[in-house]
């Protein structure tokens, strides 16, 4: 049974390229100021039993995809920070 008053901590964005994905999270510092962080790039795969899993282990060819995702994540974080800044202005 789940607690209906419990909140789920979901990322503010997920970026994907094929089997790879990166999540962007909004956090709050001790002084109440918001900041963003990312997960490591993760690769989805299916095992022999048909169950899905995620790993941070990448093949050589997936490194280019990972680099692209990190670049896109950087751009998205800057966009989110700019939106937060503009929203905080009177």
Image (cartoon, grey):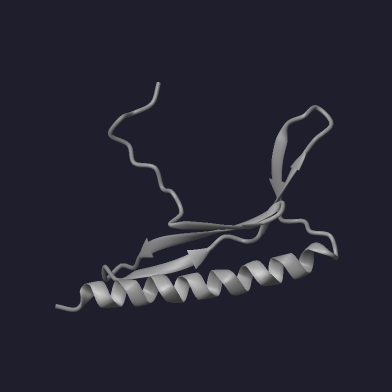
| Residue 74 position by quadrant | bottom right
- Residue 19 in the figure: left or right of residue 14: right
- Please state, as top left, top right, bottom left or bottom right, where the N terminus lies in the image: top left
Q: Residue furthest front?
A: 18
Residue sitting at x 19%, y 78%: 89
Q: Is residue 88 left or right of residue 38?
A: left
Residue 73 or residue 17, whichever sits in front: 17
Q: Nearer the viewer, residue 17 or 51?
A: 17
Identity of the residue drawn at 67% across and 71% down: 68
As drawn, 58 above or below 54: below
Task: Please state the horizontal and vertical placement of residue 62, each as a whole percent of the image.
Answer: 79, 62
Numbered disc total: 0
Image: 59 above or below 52: below
Residue 79: give x, y in percent of width and height.
42, 74
How far across and how far down the image is residue 80, in percent?
A: 40, 70
Q: Quadrant of the C terminus?
A: bottom left
Q: Is residue 66 left or right of residue 71?
A: right
Indicate the quadrant where residue 23 lies: bottom right
Residue drawn at (80%, 35%) of the image: 47
Q: Position of residue 87 (x, y in %)?
A: 24, 72
| Residue with the most extreme left position | 90
In the image, what residue occupies the spot 84% across and 31% down?
48
């Amino acid at each position: 049974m789940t607690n209906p008053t419990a909140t789920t901590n979901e990322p503010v964005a997920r970026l994907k390229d094929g089997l790879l994905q990166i999540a962007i999270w909004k956090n709050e510092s001790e002084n109440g100021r918001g900041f963003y962080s990312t997960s490591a790039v993760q690769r989805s795969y299916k095992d022999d039993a048909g169950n899905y899993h995620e790993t941070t282990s990448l093949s050589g060819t997936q490194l280019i995809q990972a680099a692209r995702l990190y670049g896109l994540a950087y751009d998205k974080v800057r966009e989110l920070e700019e939106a937060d800044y503009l929203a905080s202005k009177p």
